[in-house]
Image (cartoon, grey):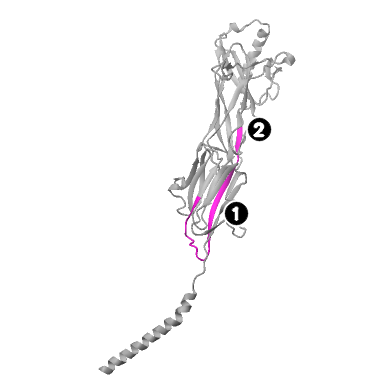
Amino acid sequence: MRRNICKALAILMAFALVMSLAAVSALAYDTINGGQTSFSKYLVADDDAQIPDVHFDFTIEAGTPVAGGDGNALEILAGPVVIDETTNEVTAPTIAPAQFSSGMPTTDGLPTDEEGSVTDGKVYAESNIAIDLTGVTFTVPGVYRYVITEQPNEFNGITNDSTAVRYLDVFVFPSESNPDVLEVQNYALRTAATSFERVYDSEAGIYKYQYVTNPGKKSDHYTNELETVDLEFSKKITGNQADMTKKFRFQLDLDNVNPGDYTLEITGTDVIRDDSNVTADNGVYTIHVDASGSYTGYFYLTNAEKVKVVSLNKGYSYEVQEEAQDYTPTEGIDNDGTENDYTDPYTGTGITSPIVKTGYTNTREGAIPTGVIITIAPFAIGLLLFGAIMLYMVSRRRRATY
């Protein structure tokens, strides 16, 4: 692209003098409509995260003209726009949102990684942002500037690019094959509204125009970042009358979650049932959050079983409830301060901690009536002895009769 821009600027240099003498007018060219171009939008996430169903919006408007002449500067024209007379909104050019979705491919590392050097623990997905200039008309050769601005996003846990504004320069020149016809020969996207200057190229022996700041640097993308956290809940059963295999029904409610699919890690058997609202595919469990940002599912846990929701966006809310049945429930699970403790609250909002671990301890205790056996034992022994004596006496009488 840099070579094309330099070539375009060289052509423009030849026309600049002619234009400055007013030897040419807009009527000397056939007017043309613009073309189409695009640039990249990256979404960076942790390598165990799912890309959510999210989009990012942009606006495009005419840039501020820059007068030429001073310091050998080249004039920059405001990009033409079409405005709806009723709504006063810009109808051309247009810029499409960047769309991301669950299951789309990702690349290891960061977009800025150089070949052979990949940042561990990170992945990124890419979406193209399409710009359509076919609805606007260019009438004279020149460099036309547009301002592109990324809008604040509505999704939790996602940070926009640190620089919201980009400047799109459109290079419009006469066609080499037909000098009477203008054509869009190139586009340049930059992070600063940089002007042009005329410099002498000693190797080529000619003057040329180049950007004043960072002549060879361009920006062809935006980068946003998704921050994720985990949620885990578990079950503990205690008590001298407790059934350690008994299943308890848990209800999980999630809110303020970005739409998309989220992976579950399940420890235990028969935890997932028809009302769990879970998709199982070859041992991989996922839940789906729709555009409402909410999810409700039911899980069946016995002692030491657990469910983990992986890579929820920061800022989500949750509630974990259970049906204790005829057991006494206690919120939280204390396992002597070990990593198996689940003592976080059973409900929370605006979560930013790396992992929430919550759950319930169910207890069933009672006194066993062991004294009943001791109390009736003397009577039982006496009755048995009496029966034995009676049997013996009957037996002797029968023998005496014979």
Return the residue nearer the eye: 361 or 284. 361
Residue 296 at what x, y percent from top left? 50, 44
Secondary structure type for disc 1: loop
Count neighbours of disc 1 (C-alpha within 10 A) and say few if under 14, some if 14 to 19, many if 20 or more. Answer: some
Q: Hey, which residue is sitting farthest top in the picture? A: 23
Secondary structure type for disc 2: loop
**Quadrant holding the N terminus:** top right
Where 43 sits versus 17, above or below? below
Instruction: Give me the residue at 49% from left, 74% from top.
Output: 370
Q: Which mark is residue 343?
A: 1
Return the residue nearer the eye: 99 or 183. 99
Give the amino acid at mark 1.
Thr
What residue range appears in magenta? 223-250
Disc 2 target residue: 162
Residue 320 at what x, y percent from top left? 54, 49
Residue 272 at what x, y percent from top left? 46, 50
| Majority secondary structure in the magenta region | strand
Return the residue nearer the eye: 268 or 89. 89
Tell me if residue 39 is in the magenta stretch: no
